[in-house]
Image (spheres, rainbow, N blue to C red):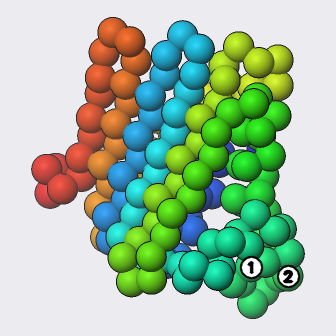
Amino acid sequence: MRDISLHVLDIVMNSIKANATLIEITIIETTSKVSVTIKDNGQGMSEDYVKHVLDPFLTSRTTRKVGLGIPLLYQNVKKTAGEFTIESKLNQGTLVKAVFNKNHIDCIPLGDMEATIITLITLEPKVDFIYRFKTCNEEFVLNTLEMK
């Protein structure tokens, strides 16, 4: 994917397919790193499934035999010598965290997070979103629970 916002869109769509009703997206941008955390209350994954989630030939889809979202995110994080973690519990949800080193030549841009968040809220009005964007100097929070 050409930017981080498209990775966020892909991972959040996985959360929605996993019947999440609350999805928290946190972006923390410093001078040297971009940290992306996506947490949901969806159906979660088994321990065994999580162990193999980086395999592009593992997917829960029935329409195709590959699932590239998480493996591509992992690949882009590792290109920057960044950090990637995924935690999940059945019937409790999933947490995906990716930390990109901004100063690395292979770091992709953040992209249009505003358009990504607007798209998600518009397409999935029944899902609640908490979006946090933090920099060294400021913080922005959008909470659809408060808007309703």
For label 2, the residue is: 65
Q: Residue at x 24, y 52 (%)?
A: 144
Q: Are marks 1 and 2 in contact (CB under 8 Å)?
A: yes
Residue 125 in sight in this render: no
User: In the figure, is residue 132 to the left or right of 106?
Assistant: left
Residue 92 appears at what percent x and percent y?
36, 76
State the residue in front, 51 or 75. 51
| The label number, if any, that marks residue 59 in the structure image | 1
Q: Residue at x 16, y 50 (%)?
A: 147
Badge 1, how many Cα within 10 Å: few under 14, some, many 20+? some
Q: Quadrant of the N terminus?
A: top right
State the residue in front, 148 or 141. 141
User: In the figure, is residue 143 to the left or right of 5?
Assistant: left
**Which residue occupies the extreme bottom position in the image?**
62
| Label 2 secondary element | loop
Residue 82 in sight in this render: yes
| Above or below: residue 92 compared with residue 40 | below
Q: Residue at x 40, y 64 (%)?
A: 40
Q: CA distance from mark 1 to mark 2?
A: 6 Å
Residue 71 appears at what percent x and percent y?
77, 58
State the residue in front, 89 or 31. 89
| Above or below: residue 82 compared with residue 129 | above
Q: Residue at x 66, y 19 (%)?
A: 102
Q: Quadrant of residue 103?
A: top right
Amino acid type of the residue tagged 1 in the rendering: Thr
Q: Earlier in the sequence, mark 1 or mark 2?
A: 1
